[in-house]
Amino acid sequence: MTKLRVHSFSISLDGYGAGPDQSLNNPLGVGGERLHEWAFQTPTFRGTHGMEGGEGGVDETFAARGERGLGATIMGRNMFGPIRGEWKDDWRGWWGDDPPFHHPVFVLTHHAHDTIPMDGGTTFHFVTEGIHEARDRALDAAGGQDVRIGGGPSTIRQFLEADLIDELHVAVVPILLGSGETLLGGLDLDELGYQIAEFTASPSAAHYVLTREA
Amino acid sequence: MTKLRVHSFSISLDGYGAGPDQSLNNPLGVGGERLHEWAFQTPTFRGTHGMEGGEGGVDETFAARGERGLGATIMGRNMFGPIRGEWKDDWRGWWGDDPPFHHPVFVLTHHAHDTIPMDGGTTFHFVTEGIHEARDRALDAAGGQDVRIGGGPSTIRQFLEADLIDELHVAVVPILLGSGETLLGGLDLDELGYQIAEFTASPSAAHYVLTREA
């Protein structure tokens, strides 16, 4: 069975998966880039962003798992860009001409948009019919591999509430953001059938893997 | 300067500091005792509860810090007992004749109650005038040592919001409670001036120490 998986999703100790006030200059919200420092140092992240080097260890183990066996990605519109409301023609994502996905990406939105082919195998598709439609199309496009739910927090929460996520890797980072978008707050994950299957920490983050009970 | 400190306060990954439905049989709420398994194995906890043995390591380091240099404890009424509304005469806390505090304990309540002297140096005092009064009386009684804020979550939140806590040790335990009392949810700890001064993990819990910026 193919799975819907979340990997390397970072939250602060106070539970926020992005800082407040996302904008062109702050794609992860104010202060949000600190959530990902643990990942920036891994060979996996550096390799997918055209850099050499990096450090092995627990963080690398988790970063690498987020690159294996995935054939498509689903993301929310805010992860794709800072534009709200109607699209403006020239936005093609945060990642430049050759985004680090290299497979079909399905962007959830209320506003239809033509497909955008990018370099390196990434194609941005836009889905206006909701998360179940996005899942069906992504599974189809993934060709037997798993589908990654990329984020942001509100997209992951929708998939969790619909009981559609099979595996969720959360990295709790020792910072306080104070406000922003909560990932798990108010969700009854126990009632939804999730359990913590793995827990291990590096000096930079505490890693948890949630799975659904069989 | 004497400090107000919180030690060994355990929360689940989903942020709850106690399970739902506290009762005589579930003093920590349903499922809440799992929050404290990391501490139960430490020599410090075992020693203060009349048992020998236990395991050293990161968990023991944090448990031991919670016993040093403290001259008084403040706690909320729900931590003292399951009774709501008017007091019934015979309740003397969860801990038997010789509670593990061995110093004055100040219980926040809306209902006045006579002081209860216990064995081993513990005395329960009841404070109806709010958290600032409790702090003043506890600091006075502590004789130059620090004051521990014991819990539960709503008591700690009140002290955090009033900017009265100098040091907060939180242990995030790899379990999901699903519902209950949140410790940090909705608090803007960044705005309140807190920062994370320490982060380290054992196989059983991730430990964070929050302090206020100078």
Image (cartoon, coloured by chain):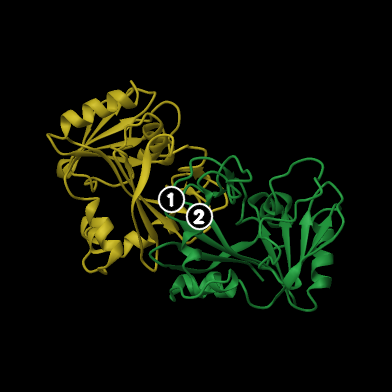
Chain colours: A yellow, B green
Q: Residues within 10 Å of mark 1 (few under 14, many from 20)?
A: many
Q: Nearer the viewer, residue A201 or A19?
A: A201
Furthest residue to the left? A143
In the image: residue A120, left or right of residue A54: left
Can you give x and y, in whole percent of width and height, for residue A211 in the image? 31, 43
Disc number at residue B58?
Answer: none
> As displayed, is residue A157 above or below residue B133?
above
Q: Give the residue number, with chain letter if any, for mark 1.
A: B175
Kindly state the secondary structure of the residue where label 2 is placed: helix
Give the mark, 1 or 2, whose residue is nearer the N terminus.
2
Image quadrant where one finds the N terminus of chain B: bottom right
What's the residue at 26%, 62% (across, down)? Answer: A60
Q: Residues within 10 Å of mark 2 (few under 14, many from 20)?
A: many
| Residue type pointed to by label 2 | Leu
Residues at discs 1 and 2 in contact (Cβ within 8 Å)? yes
Can you give x and y, in whole percent of width and height, for residue A168 in the image? 33, 45
| Same chain? Circles 1 and 2 | yes
> As displayed, is residue A149 above or below residue B52?
above
What's the residue at 48%, 40% (across, down)? Answer: B178
What's the residue at 57%, 71% (across, down)? Answer: B50
In the image: residue B91, left or right of residue B32: right
Disc number at residue B35?
Answer: 2
Kindly state the secondary structure of the residue where label 1 is placed: loop
